[in-house]
Amino acid sequence: SILAASYDTTNVSLTFVLMQLSRSPVEQQRLRDEINGAAPGTRLQDLLRLPRCVAFIDETLRLYPPVWSIPRY
């Protein structure tokens, strides 16, 4: 169940981030400019330190949390 949970939450998060991007062409361009402004050969880990990218992902996760409830037994 841990494998399924990690796969599913990643899947849901990425889906919502892409959905939010598709709704805002202006934000798409701003993120594209920020990413293109990074040094060539930048790794994915370095791209996640870009302030606009991080803010966009954090806001999307705030609006659409992949796991909003965890039942306890």
Image: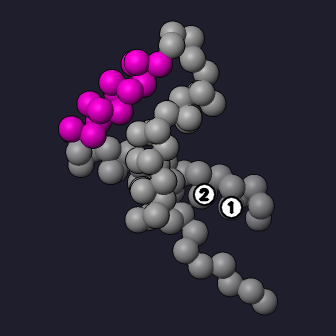
How many C-alpha atoms fall within 10 Å of the one at disc 2: few (<14), some, or many (≥20)? Answer: some
How many C-alpha atoms fall within 10 Å of the one at disc 1: few (<14), some, or many (≥20)? Answer: few
Q: Quadrant of the N terminus?
A: bottom right
Question: Residue 21 occupies which quadrant of the picture?
Answer: top left
- Considering every residue shown, the one lying at the far front of the view is 51
Residue 17 position (above or below residue 63): above
User: Is 33 colored magenta in this rendering?
Assistant: yes
Pick the residue in front: 73 or 42: 42
Q: Which residue is depicted at the point 49% across and 33% down? A: 50
Q: Which residues are magenta?
A: 26-38
- Considering every residue shown, the one lying at the far bottom of the view is 73
User: Is 6 colored magenta in this rendering?
Assistant: no
Which residue in the protein does label 1 denote?
A: 5
Residue 50 visible in image:
yes
Residue 66 position (above or below residue 51): below
Which residue in the protein does label 2 denote?
A: 8
